[in-house]
Image (spheres, rainbow, N blue to C red):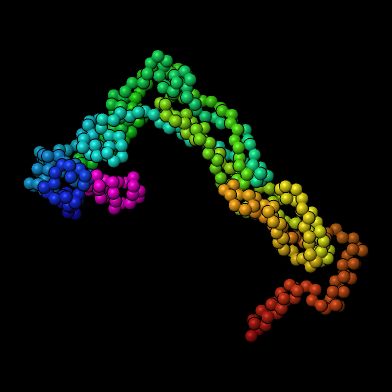
């Protein structure tokens, strides 16, 4: 497959000066960099093309060879070609391309790694009772974490000594591996990106700069939280390294199931069992809420499954909004453990309904009518 002309790749003419060449490359690098186009294969290909083109055209010898012989003049597989072959010194100077990335993304040549790292964030799972989640509560918790060593003050070095600049990356924290025109910058394998190494480690923290500790905290849970909500406690995570700031602590809430109520958003649901006679004749009964009891009027002829709404007895959302409602679903219980006399009374009652013939069971009547039409349809 033919390769694009390097000048065309960067969108410049052959008389371009070094300054404009660098500007053109910076535009391409910003537009197609993989960090800004995650998962985009086309953008990655454009980025590699631009990088290759700039590495050649920014080098006077390679550019002269390219202008005279084209791609063949800088092909590293050609004997004596200006491109050379094999790996360069991975700890050498990062060159002009490193300068460009320094301008765009920070870091690069001439900047030593500060060694300061933000501490890791911590997660703490907390299960709450529904009542506590709805009304809010304060909880005391214990967090196992790593804090700054008080002996070495977090440096990791024995008292009276200090970390030394890493001789492998010269304090950058990064090393560069290059093959041909392609290079990869990676974390220094010796200092692990810190830019410094501890020659004489602290005996207390063994050079890590941190020690294990269990901390007691009081967490205020706001009213209205629900399963999946997170409460952020800034600066309560793991200690930073080399003077870096601590991470955060995230308390992850889950609400335990309740024996009476089921929460759905800002509303609460509960099932209210009533007797057959109350459903038929109507009545009044007490139902529970999270803040006490309320009276619920049951109208005569109430059917099983009927929902009654009690306003503002639900949950006030943690992010604001109106208080939800309590919805009571009626469940009519069939009487059990009947005596002989009670069974006789029910049979007599059933007989009066049939004799009366006034349609005391409208749902059953409509259902039977539907069944009759269904079978008549099959017969046709």
Name the quadrant containing residue 170. Answer: top left
Using the rendered image of the protein, determine whether residue 269 is visible from the camera's viewpoint: no
Q: Which residue is painted at 27% across and 39% down in the image?
A: 103
Region of the chain picked out in magenta, as a range: 26-50
Q: Is residue 57 left or right of residue 310?
A: left
Residue 197 position in % (x across, y down): 35, 23
- Expressed as whole percent of the image width and height from the top left, the position of residue 98 reads 24, 37
**Viewport quadrant of the N terminus:** bottom left
Picture layout, residue 262 above or below residue 235: below
Q: Residue furthest top?
A: 160
Residue 3 is situated, as x and y percent measured from the top left of the image, at: 18, 52
Q: Main secondary structure of the magenta part?
A: helix
Give the vertical position of 28 relative to 93 (above or below): below
Residue visible at 75% across and 66% down in the picture = 303
Q: In this image, 198 relative to 122: left or right?
A: left
Q: Is residue 265 magenta?
A: no
Determine the residue positioned at 42% across, 26% down. 243
Q: Is residue 308 above or below residue 177?
A: below
Residue 41 magenta: yes
How many marks do you count on the picture? 0
């Amino acid at each position: 497959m033919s390769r694009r002309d390097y000048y065309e790749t960067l969108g410049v003419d052959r008389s371009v000066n070094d300054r404009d060449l660098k500007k053109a490359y910076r535009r391409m690098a910003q537009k197609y960099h993989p960090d800004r186009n995650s998962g985009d294969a086309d953008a990655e290909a454009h980025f590699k093309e631009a990088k290759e083109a700039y590495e050649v055209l920014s080098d006077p010898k390679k550019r002269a060879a390219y202008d005279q012989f084209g791609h063949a003049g800088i092909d590293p597989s050609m004997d004596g070609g200006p491109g050379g072959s094999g790996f360069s010194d991975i700890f050498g100077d990062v060159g002009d391309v490193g300068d460009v990335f320094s301008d765009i993304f920070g870091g690069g040549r001439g900047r030593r790694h500060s060694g300061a790292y933000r501490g890791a964030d911590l997660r703490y799972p907390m299960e709450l009772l529904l009542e506590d989640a709805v009304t809010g509560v304060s909880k005391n918790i214990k967090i196992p974490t790593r804090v700054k060593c008080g002996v070495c003050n977090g440096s990791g070095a024995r008292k009276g000594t200090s970390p030394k600049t890493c001789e492998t990356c010269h304090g950058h924290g990064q090393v560069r591996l290059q093959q041909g025109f392609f290079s990869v910058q990676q974390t220094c394998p010796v200092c692990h990106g810190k830019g410094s190494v501890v020659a004489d480690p602290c005996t207390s923290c063994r050079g890590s700069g941190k020690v294990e500790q269990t901390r007691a905290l009081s967490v205020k849970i706001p009213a209205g939280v629900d399963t999946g909500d997170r409460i952020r406690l800034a600066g309560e995570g793991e200690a930073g390294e080399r003077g870096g700031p601590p991470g955060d602590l995230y308390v992850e809430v889950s609400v335990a199931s309740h024996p009476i109520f089921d929460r759905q958003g800002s509303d609460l649901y509960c099932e209210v069992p009533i007797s057959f006679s109350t459903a038929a004749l109507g009545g009044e009964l007490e139902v529970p809420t999270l803040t006490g009891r309320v009276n619920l009027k049951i109208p005569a002829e109430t059917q099983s499954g009927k929902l009654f709404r009690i306003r503002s007895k639900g949950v006030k959302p943690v992010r604001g909004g109106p208080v939800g409602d309590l919805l009571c679903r009626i469940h009519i219980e069939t009487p059990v453990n009947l005596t002989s006399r009670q069974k006789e009374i029910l049979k007599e009652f059933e007989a009066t309904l049939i004799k009366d013939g006034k349609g005391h069971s409208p749902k059953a009547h409509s259902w039977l009518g539907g069944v009759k039409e269904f079978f008549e349809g099959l017969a046709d």
